[in-house]
Image: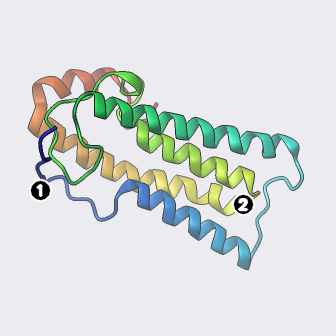
Amino acid sequence: MTKPRKRSKPSTIFPPSLVFLLLTMAGVGIEFVRALPIAPGNLIRIAVGPVLMLMGAVLWLLAWIEFRRHDEVFGHQYATETVVTSGPYRISRHPAYLAYALIMAGIGMLIDCGWILLLLPVAVLVVNGAARREESYLMARHEGAYRPYRSEVRRWI
């Protein structure tokens, strides 16, 4: 693989992974000040949390593997040479972001932190803005390949 080229667009203030991480940490911090339990002691909640986290981790790994199969760098700061449309990208234009959301929800469920679940829509809204900027970049750079893909595959699921 050749050295990746840095790209100038789209500009993102925070990487989406950092948005999910910071809001998860904020939820935990708020929980210490004012608890917002979901269902204390509920075995279903305790079982669902790790399942969501595992689903998110597997989805993220599959997205990363697919990028590597296409000799692309899995990062916002590099130019893309191809539009990846296989693997988990057949069902979501942003499977890594979906993976982060699943992991965040799983953490909230596992540790019984309602604040994390309340902050999850905020994370999705912020990251959706980043996704739109990325899609504009891909349309400008790879319109012929990206336009039909965008019309066939949903942004999230």
Quick check: 31 above or below 137? below
**Disc marking residue 81:** none
* Residue 54 locus on image (x, y percent): 61, 39
Mark 2 residue type: Cys
Q: Nearer the viewer, residue 63 or 12?
A: 63
Residue matched to label 2: 113
Residue at point 37% right, 37% down?
64
Q: Is 29 left, or right, of 44 in this rendering? A: left
Viewer can see residue 155: no
Residue at point 72% right, 79% down?
33
Quick check: 11 above or below 99? below
Quick check: 127 above or below 89? below
* Residue 101 locus on image (x, y percent): 53, 46
Q: Residues within 10 Å of mark 1 (few under 14, many from 20)?
A: few
* Residue 57 locus on image (x, y percent): 54, 40
Mark 1 residue type: Ser
Q: Nearer the viewer, residue 42 or 136?
A: 42
* Residue 136 locus on image (x, y percent): 19, 43
Residue matched to label 1: 8
Q: Is 48 left, or right, of 98 in this rendering? A: right
- Pick the quarter of the image with the N terminus: top left
Quick check: 36 above or below 58? below
Precedes in sequence: disc 1 or disc 2: 1
Q: Is 125 left, or right, of 73 in this rendering? A: right
Q: Residues within 10 Å of mark 2 (few under 14, many from 20)?
A: many
Viewer can see residue 26: yes
Question: Where is residue 90, by image quadrant?
Answer: top left
In the displayed image of the protein, which residue is found farthest to the front? 1
Measured in 3D between alpha carbons, the distance from the residue under mark 1 to the one under mark 2, in whole angstroms, is 38 Å
